[in-house]
Image (cartoon, grey):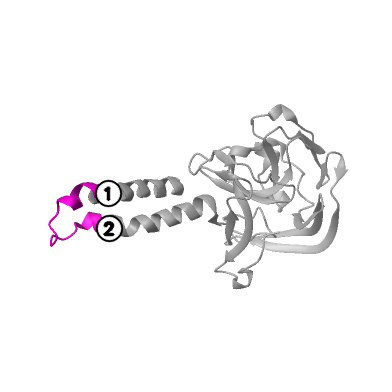
Amino acid sequence: MDFALIMFLLLVVTGSAWLLDHFMFRPKRAAEEKEPWWAEYAKSFFPVILAVFLLRSFLVEPFKIPSGSMIPTLQVGDFILVNKFTFGIRLPIISQKIVQLNDPHRGDVMVFHYPEDPSVDYIKRVVGVPGDKIMYRNKKVYVNGVLQEQQPDGDYNYVESGLKFVHTERRNENLDGHNHAVLINPEMPDVHLGAIAEFPHRDNCSYTDEEMHCTVPDGHYFMMGDNRDNSRDSRYWGFVPDNMIVGKAFLVWMNFGDLKRIGLSIN
């Protein structure tokens, strides 16, 4: 079950119990009569649950990175913080935007509800915004016909779960002026054609053995992982609609396996 929904239900239960006791039972109790346990617990927990609910819903929410699709920017086991209001204030649970603030920009690292299963949260980098024409060819991104330059930055090796050793090339990519690192495995194809799903606005994309083209529809975003050849992203399941955005990732606050990562900003 969605954690925000659980918090909301707890909020309703404790708040209702507190109000019920305050307005109905408390006036009828004798002055020396002890407050019932359920009223005492409700009064104690309601403010705490309310504070946590408001904090997570409108300001900052923690997430844990479960996979290597954003290596080297994010590592498996990173605990990150996500700004919930950067891209607008939304009603909790239903994710309905009520206040428009900023739109996502190319290069932002964004958490969103996975379009194929909205109960799951994904994190990827914004590569295309509404109206963009995205092409991916020879491991490089083109936005509206403009090559997003990459500069070699040595090798990068890591170990996947199951003790699988992975060798990649690290490159510094300039995505519309936003510099970040990506990993490229030259032995892998640009896109695994057999893994492409049917998705909304599928006719906005075309695929060949050499390249992929997609035009981003209004109100949607094209997302890619920084670990380009180990990321199932918009190349395979399509676009992220605005109403599935959770927020912008901005800080690594904990990694129990590598304490040096604590406090790293997310670029």
Does residue 106 appear to the left or right of 11 in the view shown?
right
Magenta segment range? 23-41
The percent position of residue 117, horizontal first and vertical second, equals: 54, 39
- The amino acid marked with disc number 2 is Tyr
Q: Residue at x 31, y 60 (%)?
A: 44
Q: Residue at x 27, y 58 (%)?
A: 41
Q: Tag 1: residue type? A: Ala
**Label 1 Cα crowd, 10 Å radius (few <14 / some 14-19 / many 20+):** some
Q: Is residue 211 above or below residue 172?
A: above
- Helix, strand or loop status at disc 1: helix
Query: In terms of image quadrants, where is residue 164?
Result: bottom right
* In the displayed structure image, the side of residue 117 where residue 267 appears, left or right: right
Measured Cα–Cα span from mark 1 to mark 2: 9 Å
Quickly name the residue at label 1.
17
Where on the picture, by quarter, is residue 198? top right
Residue sitting nearer the eye, 152 or 105: 105
Give the residue at mark 2.
41
Q: Nearer the viewer, residue 234 or 216?
A: 216
Front residue of this view, candidates 55 and 225: 55
